[in-house]
Image (cartoon, rainbow, N blue to C red):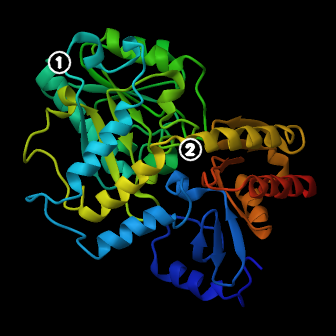
Amino acid sequence: MLGDVTSPAAAQIALAERYAAHNYHPLPVVVAEAEGAWVTGVDGRRYLDCLAGYSALNFGHRHPAVIQAAREQLDRLTLVSRAFHHDQFGAFCAELAALVAASRPADPTLGRLGDRDGRSTETMVLPMNTGAEAVETALKVARKWGYEVKGVPDGQATIVVASGNFHGRTISIVSFSDDPDAHDHYGPYTPGFVTVPYGDADAIAAAIDETTVGVLIEPVQGEAGVIVPPEGYLRDVRRVCGENDVLLLADEIQSGLGRTGTTFACDREGVVPDLYILGKALGGGVVPVSAVVGSVDVLGVVRPGQHGSTFGGNPLACAVGRSVVALLRDGRYQERARDLGIVLRRRLDELVGKGLVSVRCVGLWAGIDVDPALGSGRDICAALAERGVLAKDTHGSTIRIAPPLVIEQADLEWAVDQLADVLATG
């Protein structure tokens, strides 16, 4: 039973409580093994993973192709300084660039700056490790581009961001967070960011001035509770950025790589940002892998010695990343997310008025708002864990559901059945 001090998990939880900084507040589940959409605790109990590592496990735990790629690379080479080349790096960058290029729309007005004004559209990749590093990289590139290409006076660049955002935990990123837990008591903060309401392209247009070099948004806001913007928002933001010679930076760390039923969430509106910011699922649930992808006219402003990472683009990460790109190439996981997302939306909609206040769903990704009278989101997630389903609350009574794309439909429906039982019993 969860929380039972005599359970096999108790000793592990006690060690974590004693020796680990308390920057997380996990449910009392200690996972020891996993495969596909299921995990097994140290007590032998199985749980259906409906969080998938915040989309880091889009392809499930220990996907055979990813594990094979990692094992083969572990037997050959794991790390080499970027002072030298290695045999996985170029291939990883080329294959990821091709995956991104395949998402370009037929309408050039929805594409990159290079698609509109004759600049080169050749795609480049800048690999890093974590999602936060990728966001920081995109911010640095946008500022450098603004100074060296757009001609903004040095030190004056600004970037427009959206309220409710979550892009990571670094000082610069929390500087423009409006979540008190993420933001407060970490100042002094990094200047140069202007916040506007999410989903309002007119507000972005009004915020742009001669110092603006970029607009950073999540195509779907994940941490905020799977907030889906109004239809046409991304197209309007793309248009506004193009009209004002401003870079569109799309944080696809949670929404990208199949989660929303398309390779990238921007694909849902046929929009190509100037910089894709990728992470989480790119590492296949094995190693941290992130990347910023864009045209040579943007990423080309970075020259030797100006940005880097000891582990960024390492051989193991590249081998794993290549296996992930290969999984996405034929579109079957994107299709699976679309099809199962329809099932998930239908089943969750049935619970509105029966414990759920509202449902937001895009692909195999849902944010649900629970009637506060039934308890907090954490209360509901604890009750779900008792029934063998793992999910995560956010912001009070909101719960995120994001199972691996490999989940079976019967298991997905069983998970919703458990949610229905929890809501019914209050």
Q: Amino acid at mark 1?
A: Lys
Q: Is residue 4 above or below residue 327?
A: below
Front residue of 68/235: it is 68
Asked if residue 52 lies left or right of residue 127, the reply is right
Which label sits in the foreground, 2 or 1? Answer: 2
Q: Position of residue 93 (x, y in %)?
A: 26, 46
Front residue of 252/35: it is 35
Residue at the farthest right position: 425
Residue at the farthest bottom position: 6
> To which residue does mark 2 refer?
332
Q: Amino acid at mark 2?
A: Arg
Q: Residues within 10 Å of mark 1 (few under 14, many from 20)?
A: some
Label 1 residue SS: helix
Residue at point 79%, 64% (across, down): 383
Label 2 and label 1: CA atoms lie apart by: 40 Å
Image mark for residue 247:
none
Label 2 residue SS: helix
Q: Is residue 270 above or below residue 314?
A: above
